Image: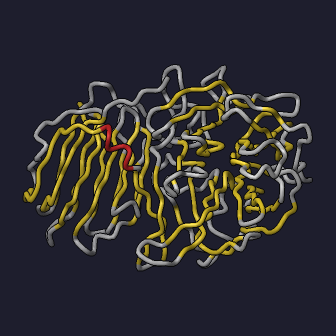
Amino acid sequence: MNDPNGLVYYDGEYHLFYQYHPHSDVWGPMHWGHAVSTDLLHWEHLPIALYPDEHGMIFSGSAVVDVENTAGFGMNALVAIFTYNRDYKESQNLAYSTDRGRTWIKYAGNPVIPPPNPLRDFRDPKVFQYEDHWVMSLAAGNSVEFFTSPDLKNWEQSGTFGGGDHGSTVGVWETPDLFKLTVASTNQSRWVLTVGVGNGGPAGGSGTQYFIGDFDGRTFVSENPKETVLWADHGADYYAPQSWSNEPGGRRIMLGWMSNWQYAREVPSNGWRGIFNLPREVSLIETKGGLRLGHRPIPELRSLRSDLFHCEERLIRPGEDPLNGLQADVVEIEAEIQIQPSTESFGFHLRKGGEERTTLSVDARSHEIFLDRSHSGQSGFHENFPSRHAAALDTAQGTILLHIFLDRCSVEVFANNGLTCLSDLIYPSAESLGLEFFTTGGGVHIRSLDIYHMAETKTH
């Protein structure tokens, strides 16, 4: 599986559709898989929602609740808007459900937007309601095209953003999402446009960039210079994120595919291939450089915690390790670390055993954070997998906040309230369970350090 699709909340359930090939662990004729959850943690698999047919494979898209029956499929019908791909011709189409998403009917009048000529990349519709009409964001080459409709069936183009002169354009643009956010601690609001790029990401290969600006119901305008590139995550494995529509608490919760097209077909998982990142609540935060997107893991994850380690107000010198041989495989780590004038770096060795380790380090001199998986375990399946990923990190205030989730094949790092994120796949041996803390140059003051074991969630 790869891209999340059709994220929508309806009648007590979070719906998650996703790109899915049920007959192989490599990419092939794509379907929409389907699962539902009441808490974003425990999931129930439902039957495949959309199958490929004579019109093509089922590529990515979105889903909405048609509360007012604008399309004529029924009051509160769930409507999926998806891309058909047939022989590299891509069109936009509808399917609907009137039984809470359990069965789906493809609209007889498809396509609602036919494939344009000669454009090959024309896909991934994200639809939402804006005042009295529907809006579609659609990836088209190195741009996002906007369409409007009164009824989900009849669409007209209303604007274009990008076109090769905004942000990163090394790779084709994919999976756009557009939503409005309030700026933290103010009454201001902005619109955020997220876009997956197939190549040229901050860690190489695919990545996710975003733009901040204004949307008038028809088109988007960025408030930053055209050459500004803002990355949602600086690791290698956060791609094609989408956000839930109709989230009952008014939160903007995003979910990404945790992989990278450089090696997605080759990762050494056994009998399965493809996972998602943890759900993240996103917000806009004011920084010295302007507004930036902040990411926080959803608070529902706290329900999986059990205490494993705690310390506070402790000075750690080089060569000391407060974790003292602690071992664990699935943990959540929260740390507030005060650096000293002599501190050069500090961090954690994760999933350490023998020659294996994944290293998260903060460099107080260069003001950067690094996630190094060069020695993390199995990595020879692709030349670009053993790598060290870096991001700028504000250390000027002296206090660094780290929130880390470590699973059996993944690390997700949220630094300084999620202004800087790094997400990477790793493939350590099952026996590599060591956790270590280190500091170099000088000591650090641990304000607080909490490590929690995380219970496994159930999917059925």
Is residue 172 shown above or below 270? below
Quadrant of the snapshot with the N terminus: top right
Name which residue lies at 61% across and 45% down.
7
Using residue 86 as the reference point, say whether residue 134 is left or right of it: left
Name which residue lies at 59% across and 39% down.
15
x then y, percent, for residue 149:
83, 59
Dividing the picture into quadrants, the one containing residue 303 is: top left
- The figure's colour scheme reads secondary structure
Using residue 391 as the reference point, say whether residue 329 is left or right of it: left
x then y, percent, for residue 313:
9, 59
Using residue 221 as the reference point, say whether residue 448 is left or right of it: left
Dividing the picture into quadrants, the one containing residue 411 is: top left
x then y, percent, for residue 141:
76, 57
x then y, percent, for residue 407:
36, 36
Is residue 393 shown above or below 24? below
Closer-to-camera residue (37/271):
37
Name which residue lies at 7% across and 57% down.
314
- Residue 252 visible somewhere in the drawing: yes
Closer-to-camera residue (398/264):
398
Is residue 445 shown above or below 18? below
